[in-house]
Amino acid sequence: MVMTTVGTAELKAHLSEHLQAVRRGETILVLDRREPIARIVPVGAAGAALVVRPAVGPLHEVPLLGPPAGEGDVLAQLRVERAERG
């Protein structure tokens, strides 16, 4: 198995090329300031599970804001909502 190590800036700058390498069967280890933070593996790789996780946690924990009440000054409404949050 081929494993490439790449920093976050390099991954961002050349994402398409790195994803092509993954399609060819390579695994990419992503580093942030020399610390491993992620591994990108082909979906069909032996032992690789496709795991999708929400970015912020379960949906019941995400506060949902409704549409602004009525017409009017958008900035004033934003200030009210921010004040209500704390």
Image: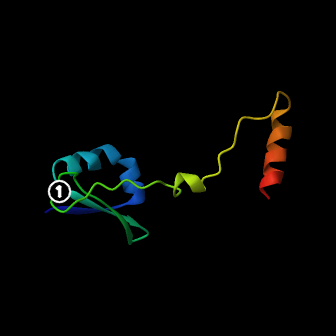
Q: Nearer the viewer, residue 10 or 53?
A: 53
Q: Position of residue 53 (x, y in %)?
A: 42, 56
Q: Percent x, y for residue 70?
A: 82, 29
Image quadrant where one finds the C terminus: bottom right
Q: Residue at x 19, y 56 (%)?
A: 26
The one of 54 and 74 positioned closer to us in this rendering: 54
Where's residue 78, x and y in %?
79, 42
Residue 4 placement: quadrant: bottom left
What residue do we see at 21% from left, 63% from top?
3
Q: Residue at x 25, y 58 (%)?
A: 49
* Quadrant in which residue 27 is drawn: bottom left
| Residue furthest front in the image | 60
Q: Nearer the viewer, residue 52 or 27?
A: 52
Q: Give neighbour class at mark 1: few <14, some 14-19, many 20+ (Cα, 10 Å).
A: some
Residue pictured at 77% horizontal, 55% vertical:
85
Find residue 48 and report its image quarter: bottom left
Disc 1 target residue = 45
7 vs 36, nearest the viewer: 36
